Image (tube, rainbow, N blue to C red):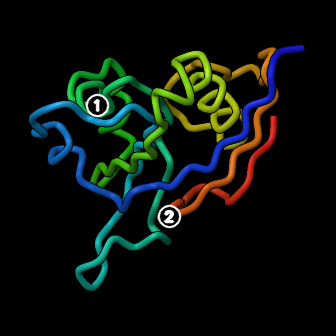
């Protein structure tokens, strides 16, 4: 059996996909959520959030700025804005293999419509425990795989 990963993710407030694409400079290493959502009374309304994709990268801004699944995201937004939430995952504590295990665990539980990774279940050697905080909607507060 592989090692056990335990991580506390703090999700950022939602930002527009277009805003993230325009970012200059290095983005953080971590996980990202692609969400469709609407503003109500000038604020992003969590009740309108639909999870479209979950991923990871060494540089989240660069990854989102040139993503091969963008063609999957836009049609599924259906009249909503395309939003991004980021949870930084420190490089000195977790590597790409660890981030992929975290994404796989979240994908198995949430089943986003975009992306095929881990669609058939969690079959990794690492056991994973995730606690989510910050602006985590539409995710739950805990996951285990």
Among the two numbered marks 1 and 2 on one chain, the one whose residue lies closer to the N terminus: 1
At a point 81% along the width and 34% down the height, the residue shown is 145
As drawn, is 107 to the left or to the right of 78? Answer: right
Residue sitting nearer the eye, 19 or 59: 59
Residue 123 visible from this viewpoint: no
**Label 1 environment density (alpha carbons within 10 Å; few <14, some 14–19, many ≥20):** many
At a point 29% along the width and 77% down the height, the residue shown is 43
Query: Is residue 98 depicted above or below 34 in this figure?
Result: above
Quarter of the image for residue 26 reads top left
Percent across and percent down for residue 87 are 45, 46
Rendered image: mark on residue 45: none
At a point 67% along the width and 58% down the height, the residue shown is 140
Percent across and percent down for residue 91 are 46, 27
Rendered image: mark on residue 64: 1
Query: Helix or strand or loop: what does disc 1 sit on?
Result: helix
Please identify, in this view, whether the residue under mark 1 or under mark 2 is nearer the observer: 2
At a point 30% along the width and 38% down the height, the residue shown is 74
Query: Helix or strand or loop: what does disc 2 sit on?
Result: strand
Quarter of the image for residue 39 reads bottom left
Give the quarter of the figure containing the N terminus.
Answer: top right
Q: Residue furthest front?
A: 92
As drawn, is 50 to the left or to the right of 105? Answer: left
Percent across and percent down for residue 82 are 29, 49
Residue sitting nearer the eye, 134 or 48: 134
As drawn, is 11 to the left or to the right of 119? Answer: left
Q: Mark 2 = which residue?
A: 134
């Amino acid at each position: 059996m592989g090692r056990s990963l335990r991580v506390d993710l703090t999700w950022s407030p939602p930002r527009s996909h277009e805003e993230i694409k325009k970012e200059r400079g290095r983005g953080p290493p971590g996980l990202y959520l692609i969400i469709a959502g609407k503003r109500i009374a000038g604020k992003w309304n969590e009740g309108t959030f639909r999870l479209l994709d979950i991923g990871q990268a060494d540089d989240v801004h660069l990854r989102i700025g040139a993503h091969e699944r963008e063609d999957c995201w836009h049609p599924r937004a259906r009249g909503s804005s395309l939003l991004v939430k980021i949870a930084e995952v420190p490089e000195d504590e977790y590597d790409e293999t660890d981030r992929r295990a975290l994404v796989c665990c979240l994908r198995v539980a949430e089943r986003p419509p975009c992306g095929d990774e881990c669609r058939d279940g969690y079959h990794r050697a690492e056991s994973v425990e995730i606690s989510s905080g910050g602006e985590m909607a539409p995710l739950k507060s805990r996951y285990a795989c």
